[in-house]
Image (cartoon, rainbow, N blue to C red):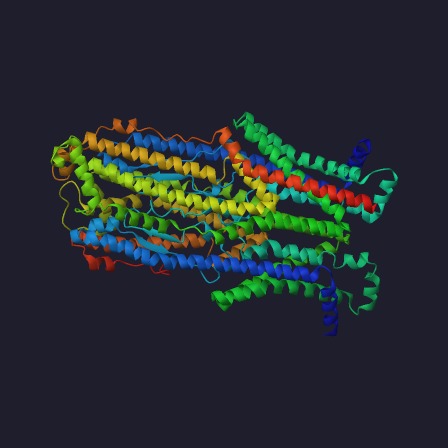
Amino acid sequence: MRLWNHELHLLLRQRIALPAFLLLTLLAATSVWVGLAEIARQNATIARIQPQQAEDVAAIAKWASKEGDAGSAAYYTFHATWDAPSTLAFAAIGQRDIAPYVLRIRALGLEGQLYESENYNAELALPGRFDWAFVLNYLAPLFLIVLLHDLKSGEREAGRITLLAAMARHESALWLRRTVLRVSFVFLSLALPFFFGALISGTSLLHIGAVLLITAAYLLFWTLIAMLVWRWQLSSVANAAALAASWLILTLILPALTHLIINSAIPVGQGVELTLAQREAVHDGWDKPKEQTMQTFFKAHPEWKDTAPIKGGFHWKWYYAFQHVGDMSVAPQVRAYRTALEARDRATCAAGFLLPAVGVQTIIHRLAETDLTAQLSYQDRIRAFHARLRKFYYRYVFNEAPFRAPDFEAAPTWINDAV
Amino acid sequence: VNRLRLIAADELRLMRRNRVAMLGLIMLLALLGIAVLTSIAHRDSNDQIRARLQAQADMEFDGQPARHPHRMVHYGHFVFRPLPALAAFDPGVDAFTGNTIYLEGHRQNSANFGDVRQSSLLMRFGQMTPAFVLQTLAPLVLIFIGFGLIARERENGTLRLLQTHGATALQIIAGKALALSAVAALILAPAVLALGWLLLVERAYIMPSLLLLTGYAAYLAIWVGVIVLASSIAGQTRSALIMLVGLWALTTILLPRLAPDVALGVKPLSTRLESDIAIQHDLRQMGDSHNPDDPYFNAFKARVLKQYGVAKVEDLPLNYRGLLALEGEKLTSKLFDDYGNRQFAQQKAQSRFADRFGLFSPTIAIRRLSMALAGTDLEAHRRFLEQSEAYRFTIVQRLNQLQASAVTYSDDSNRNKDPEAGRRVRIDPKNWRNVPDFRYRAASQNEMLRAALPGTAMIALWLLGLTLAMRVTTRRLQEMM
């Protein structure tokens, strides 16, 4: 213990050590604060839209319930969905700044509604967010490099290394002590702000533990790289240069090249092509014989087969039927699009096994549910909700039942975690 | 001057022998080469895909069968944003914004299918483009090559040696800077080739291309200056290296990320969903077309009847339903413009706020300049959004006009009851072909140069500040020698 205390004194007397720890703590704390503020903003938005949405529906109900026409009620009423941030999202905002986390849909064809974008400033999204995951991924290794690059070579250059080796009972234990001390401080500088953020956000202990474990593993990786470089017995300057170059390659160049390779190896086709196809399918519905559309629709929804046949030029039954038939007709494209997106995500995951920076980002964002998979899962929940909405309105439309004020309130409501 | 050249030549000889420096340089050049080739290929294929999809959408619109004009209002149209040639150099926000919009009546849809939502998180690590390599990676390689320029001489005690040979501090600093500038020029070479290709083959604008090149040359010159400065201030080579890498991390990695977060905190945006609800709300306040006793639409009806001198809508020479559709679209479109402008204004205020950090980070400054000149900044996206909204309004009103003039009121009212009327309301499909196609008007050369002003000013400010700092340092170095 006395040895450790001694080393601690030595460390803190170094010109660069204490400022480095304080700076890293400050950066980590800032990132946590930024993340918490962003998530608070998103939660506030989700809360804010509820009364607005209720007012909007009430205004529609006011005139539509007089006519009691279920078809136009379904046509004009939008239903809000939202994707509440997880309690870990503050640490890794991920794609939540560019993908919508609130979206309104109605009982018309879903494929034309599902891919709507959010209002966001693309110039601000371009460099990426300043969240805790960023501090961990990019900045923490740089701090480690600053602290570790001259651990051995500095003593050699100061002419103390033989003396130190002679004095220490176990030379390797000395270096290990010094290394452990520095890495622990870096770890604490990162972990403490995160931990407080997690407490405020109410993150589960399991997630906190997992994140801290990943943090430790990532720091260990960079420590090992530093130790590897020591073995070459280079000067401090050369050590610093070699480590900074490794950092550049491992956190910037290789991930960017991997992205390039993944996106060209796994083309996603064009999401827009399926939207174009869906529009054609929906609008062809107007010109196709009604009977044909209804037969296709009844294959998916046989429960309405025996309702009264359609007479006249227009009926909501037929309208909603061809909306859904439009969605059905592009199901293979939707699946292909989805599969390609998932393949890209899987490939990134695989790259994470080779590139620790990518691996850390992948795991933390998965835990925080702010990655592509989370986006797709939100879409899945919207799909399920859309199906509930359709079924709800079909009951009125196909039974030709009146749709009155209480019926507006009976409509399915979004439950955030309903899958 | 002769001695200056000697110092520079001497330094270059040393650099050539520095195997680590050479390796870094070769790696950077290789990366830049890869970035140039893939970026050009990426832009070309994306532009082609968009052009093909635009042609397909135009063809599908023109090929629609005889229909009620209002069906076409709902059938709508797709427009695609073409990619400017220089997007191959700096794609800017292209991947972060949707590049296609579905246009229809009554609604304003978002631009969708940006690459960022079709990619994994890896995209947020940065895209390997010439702009990224030059903005982010090139300075670090220059740092690796140049951190010891003067600090090394001082550490080895050779600074005094140079002086005894009659070299002044200015000559030493200028000579070293010249040597590092030669490296910077070499780094810029692939960029020159890329721009030359874009200029000659892909017909990029001349002036913006040249200014873009000048901008990047100035940016690298700024870094050469910073490196020489740090190297002459630092006591040891190691502290020069650490100071420079720290500065690099701060200005190219940290600040560009911190600035947006501050801007977003200070000037938040409202979500699409909220704007959507607010627009519906405002619309109801103006006039509710579903309310048979709505004062706004009653007044409109009275005005129309009076204008044509008839007593009831059935007697109008035009289809009243069409006139109503024209009026309704006018109202909604006005609101779309209002809310759109507010949204744009807020986004612009955010960007301007974030740009202030350009005073602390030349990377933010060059990014602003580069995106503006490449035509891939937020303003370029706004151009597209505004033009597509104008186009949406044009085609929808044209179709509403057709409903008013080519469909009779009685047919329109009875179209679902009387099959004959239902047949008559489907008008000749040649009308669809007469609707003009969407022609995106890209920014002109002059507009681009104007847009580049803020970025140019920031870069110029940096050069100026650096020159002043250089003079002070030279004087100090002279005194120390």
B428 lies above or below B233: above
The mark tally for this picture is: 0
Q: Quadrant of residue B327?
A: top left
Residue sticking out furthest to the bottom: A1
B73 lies above or below A129: above
Pick the front one: B268 or B309: B309
Residue sticking out furthest to the right: B164
Residue at 75 percent across and 48 percent down: it is B233
Whole-percent x, y for residue A417 in the image: 38, 61
Q: Quadrant of residue B315?
A: top left
Whole-percent x, y for residue A308 in the image: 14, 49
Whole-percent x, y for residue B199 in the image: 55, 27
Image position of B481 (left or right of B393): right
Whole-percent x, y for residue A230 in the image: 74, 56
Pick the front one: B305 or A201: B305
Residue at 39 percent across and 30 percent down: it is B439
Q: Quadrant of the N terminus of chain B?
A: top right
Q: Quadrant of the C terminus of chain B?
A: top right
Residue at 35 percent across and 33 percent down: it is B57
Residue at 73 percent across and 43 percent down: it is B228
Q: Is residue B130 visible?
A: no
Q: Is residue B127 visible?
A: yes
